[in-house]
């Protein structure tokens, strides 16, 4: 067994944020090297560096013992390093063969696309992927998501890849598709291709991985042969020791039920399946789960952005049947969405305008906006939430991630909700801001709000939630109290099909 | 799982390098110039044309040109509402034509009932014309919100439908005499398009009133802010509880009503209604909005900018006519000015965001 990729003392800074701190990572030839860690732990950053799309601030990369400069994805490809991104980068309007050769079309006569040649080589690649029956002329958009993923892998295989990086390729796959993918990976291993595999799904990667490397907060914290580890060890390495220093535990007395959800179902590719839950006054409830578990879909449905196919939502004991955003807002719900840029902020507007967007109708005097009231209200909220801004008239895009998050929170609070729905409230903000948002959540609970928040981070959900609900494939698969929750139980309930099957 | 939180550089990282202050000052000056570019262009145009022709800067010519501007400005103000939400309205020229024919028909031949013919007063006729425009706008809005037709397609279709309806109204003919008679109680249609108040054409006064109302609505009302929010980020607007569909329908109604009003002014000025009234005027209207700094992507723009844009287009066209440039060259120059405006708009955005980064 020999090293093929060695990354020595890699550091990567984005402005003031250290994404990777002096990481030394080794991948072994012809093995499946698994990378695990929470969001923002640095795994994807390291993979971007290894695939040439980012350059390290310092450190050295060796391939087969020789130092290499991976200054672009093209260079990395030429050296035999391919990457499959989590989000598919295929053209649904083009055929499999066209997708495989997009941007590097085979030519004949130097000018024209060699469609026949492409089709032939596409067939070879599909065969290698165990998809002999698939016609290379099929439109990629017509394929199920799992086969699309295989086409993406096929793109990498065309390049004579020696090292194949896969960033969570199974998050969108069904069980059967995962099996096919793992067969392909086993096959690649036989052909002496090195696989670097990023995954969150403990039960899956334990089946296929030879080595496991754990990242936490930008550092490589453990590197071990898979056979010498168990699930508990991996989770402990991922979470670290002392999450409580960062987060504030809610300690408010719990009051009446504010939000009562009964049998809520939402159809769709990511579905919500018969979910019931309650949130009480003064309570902080966490929803833990993997991407695609239906958590965002759940809170978006509660907020009226999606229509439920069945189920009831009651706020303060009163059912809200209309299910529009305005009705749910009037009933007392407010959502701080996961993707601030896409769903939260109006980028063309100022901080003040963004804060007041939901409640402008209250700021009027005989139909016209009252600039004084606007200024006062916005200023009060900025002070209350300690939002750091250059000025209320500044464009909201000029703020840091944490402060943008607080702007969205300020807008939500102005609608005078009783229950706050927070979808990954600490995602994409730095540690200091995380701690502040956590403090705000505890404060809000103390003021009698009910707080329901979604988190993908074990440490966060364990440190902050009075109760944790776990979602997998649209259902709530487990519920824990702050006293009886363990990391292992959360991971098992979120990732394992067997738990789901045992309960259903 | 992408490590998004590291991908966004912290704002503290953008600490200004030492040579920054002078550069920033320069950039600010350039930005100010770019922001006021429509005004700058207008002043430059006036200087150039008045140096070529002594007639250009006379009071009577300025009033005449402003009257020409008024009609396009009213159309453009309506279209600006739509563009601010991220939509587009290609049907305004046809709506103006339809309103013109409806009003012309009512004045010329009245409304035929089985029992006889009814004539309405001029005020009622104008009101009916505007309501027709608003209704056509409402249809645009419904197509776009309820049936999810892309605004470009919905209003392109309406461009043909409304024009066809205008032609059907008179079977392609012209209503030649709109003066009305005392007996029918429908005289005075010339007031809005021909007459003057205090030495200034009534049409110009109407433009001033429409512009003032539009400025108040866009900047001083919740509805105005909602328009900008829908154009800036529709998803965020939905989540903020804004009734996005209502806002969209409303802007097409406003656009249709403005178009009808412009059509009526034009008809009054001409003293006759013919079905080709205001053909291709939608392009001048959109050009004025864009020239005035309204972003076609939505969320950015001002009414005053649009009015300035209409002045540039009007003063440019009339100036070219006055100095005897051929109509072919007029087209070329007008097109070039519009493209130039969009290029400078983008330069302004880039400069603005780079300044924002520096000062953040």
Image (cartoon, helix red, strand yellow):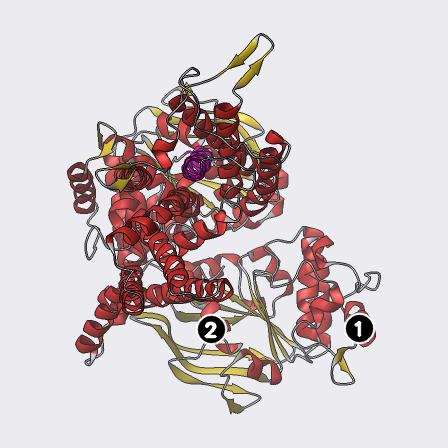
Single out the residue that lies furthest toward the bottom: A66
Residue B58: x, y in percent?
Answer: 25, 56
Q: In this figure, which residue is indicated by the disc labeled 1?
A: A115
Q: In this figure, which residue is indicated by the disc labeled 2?
A: A46
Sort mark 1 into few (<14), some (14-19) or many (20+) by Cα contacts within 10 Å.
Answer: some
Left or right: A490 as drawn, with respect to A205: left
Chain under numbered label 2: A
Check contact, mark 2 vs mark 1: CB within 8 A.
Answer: no
Residue B248: x, y in percent?
Answer: 45, 37
Please name the residue shown 25% across and 69% down the image.
Answer: B358
Circle 2 SS class: helix
Nearer to me, B89 or A19? B89
Circle 1 SS class: helix
**Magenta stretch: includes residue A482:** no
Q: Which residues are magenta?
A: B243-270
Left or right: A98 as drawn, with respect to A239: right
Q: Is residue A132 visible?
A: yes
Single out the residue that lies furthest toward the top: B115
Residue B221: x, y in percent?
Answer: 28, 36
Residue A130: x, y in percent?
Answer: 79, 65
**Magenta stretch: includes residue B263:** yes
Nearer to me, A78 or A357? A357
The numbered mark, 2 or 1, whose residue comes first in the sequence reads 2
Please name the residue shown 35% across and 55% down the image.
Answer: B309
Please name the residue shown 46% across and 33% down the image.
Answer: A304
């Amino acid at each position: 067994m020999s090293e093929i990729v060695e990354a020595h003392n890699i550091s990567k800074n984005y402005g003031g944020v250290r994404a990777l701190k002096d990481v030394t990572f080794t991948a072994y030839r012809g093995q499946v090297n698994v990378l695990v860690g929470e969001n923002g732990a640095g795994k994807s950053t390291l993979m971007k560096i290894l695939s040439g799309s980012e350059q390290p601030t310092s450190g050295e990369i060796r391939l087969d013992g020789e130092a290499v400069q991976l200054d672009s994805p093209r260079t990395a490809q030429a050296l035999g390093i391919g990457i499959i991104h989590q989000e598919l980068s295929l053209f649904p309007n083009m055929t499999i063969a066209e997708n495989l050769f997009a941007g590097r079309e085979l030519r004949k006569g130097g000018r024209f696309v060699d469609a026949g040649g492409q089709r032939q080589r596409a067939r070879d690649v599909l065969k290698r992927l165990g998809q002999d029956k698939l016609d290379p002329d099929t439109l990629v958009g017509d394929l199920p998501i799992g086969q699309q993923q295989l086409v993406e892998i096929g793109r990498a295989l065309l390049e004579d890849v020696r090292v194949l990086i896969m960033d969570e390729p199974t998050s969108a796959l069904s069980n059967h598709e995962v099996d096919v993918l793992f067969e392909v990976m086993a096959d690649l291993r036989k052909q002496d291709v090195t696989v670097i595999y990023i995954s969150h799904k403990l039960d899956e990667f334990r089946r296929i991985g030879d080595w496991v490397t754990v990242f936490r907060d930008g550092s490589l914290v453990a590197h071990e042969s898979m056979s010498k580890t168990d699930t508990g060890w991996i989770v402990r390495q991922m979470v670290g020791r002392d999450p409580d220093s960062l987060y504030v535990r809610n300690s408010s007395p719990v009051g009446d039920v504010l939000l009562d959800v009964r049998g809520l179902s939402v159809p769709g590719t990511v579905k919500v399946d018969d979910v019931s839950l309650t949130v009480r006054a003064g309570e902080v409830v966490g929803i833990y789960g993997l991407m695609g578990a239906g958590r965002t879909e759940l809170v978006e449905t509660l907020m009226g952005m999606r229509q439920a196919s069945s189920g009831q939502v009651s706020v303060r004991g009163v059912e809200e049947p209309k299910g529009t955003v305005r009705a749910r807002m009037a009933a007392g719900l407010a959502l701080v969405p996961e993707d601030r840029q896409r769903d939260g902020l109006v980028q063309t507007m100022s901080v003040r305008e963004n804060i007041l967007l939901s409640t402008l109708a209250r700021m009027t005097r005989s139909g016209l906006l009252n600039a004084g009231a606007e200024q006062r209200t916005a200023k009060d909220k900025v002070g209350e939430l300690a939002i750091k801004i250059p000025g209320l008239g500044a464009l909201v895009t000029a703020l840091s991630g944490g402060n943008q998050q607080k702007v969205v929170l300020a807008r939500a609070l102005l609608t005078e909700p009783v229950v706050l729905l927070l979808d990954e409230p600490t995602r994409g903000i730095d540690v200091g801001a995380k701690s502040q948002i956590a403090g705000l959540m505890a404060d809000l609970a103390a003021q009698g709000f009910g707080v329901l928040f979604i988190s993908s981070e074990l440490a966060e959900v364990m440190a902050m939630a009075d109760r944790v609900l776990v979602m997998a494939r649209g259902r709530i698969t487990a519920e824990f109290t702050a006293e009886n929750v363990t990391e292992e139980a959360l991971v098992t309930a979120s990732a394992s099909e067997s738990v789901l099957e045992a309960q259903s | 799982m992408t490590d998004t939180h590291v991908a966004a550089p912290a704002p503290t990282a953008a600490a200004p390098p030492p040579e920054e202050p002078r550069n920033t000052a320069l950039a600010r000056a350039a930005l100010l110039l770019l922001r006021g570019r429509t005004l700058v262009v207008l002043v430059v145009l006036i200087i150039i044309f008045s140096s070529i022709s002594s007639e250009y800067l006379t009071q009577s010519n300025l009033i005449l040109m402003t009257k020409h501007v008024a009609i396009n400005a009213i159309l453009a103000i309506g279209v600006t509402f739509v563009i601010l939400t991220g939509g587009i309205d290609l049907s305004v020229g046809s709506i103006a034509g339809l309103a013109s024919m409806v009003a012309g028909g009512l004045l010329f031949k009245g409304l035929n009932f089985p029992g006889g013919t009814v004539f309405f007063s001029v005020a009622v006729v104008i009101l009916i014309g505007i309501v027709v425009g608003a209704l056509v706008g409402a249809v645009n809005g419904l197509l776009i919100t309820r049936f999810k037709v892309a605004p470009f397609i919905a209003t392109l279709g309406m461009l043909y439908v409304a024009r066809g309806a205008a032609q059907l109204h008179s079977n392609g003919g012209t209503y030649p005499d709109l003066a009305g008679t005392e007996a029918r109680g429908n005289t005075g249609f010339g007031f809005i398009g021909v007459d003057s108040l205090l030495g200034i054409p009534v049409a110009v006064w109407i433009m001033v009133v429409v512009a003032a109302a539009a400025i108040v609505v866009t900047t001083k009302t919740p509805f105005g802010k909602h328009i900008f929010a829908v154009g800036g980020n529709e998803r965020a607007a939905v989540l903020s509880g804004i009734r996005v569909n209502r806002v969209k329908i409303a802007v097409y109604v406003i656009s249709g009503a403005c178009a009808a009003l412009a059509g009526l002014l034009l008809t009054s000025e001409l003293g006759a209604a013919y079905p080709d009234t205001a053909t291709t005027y939608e392009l001048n209207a959109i050009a004025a909005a864009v020239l005035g700094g309204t972003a076609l992507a939505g969320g950015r723009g001002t009414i005053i900018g649009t009015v300035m844009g209409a002045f540039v287009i009007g003063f440019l066209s009339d100036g070219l006519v006055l100095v005897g440039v051929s109509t072919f060259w007029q087209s070329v120059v007008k097109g070039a000015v519009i493209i130039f405006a969009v290029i400078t708009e983008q330069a302004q955005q880039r400069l603005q965001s780079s300044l924002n980064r520096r000062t953040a």
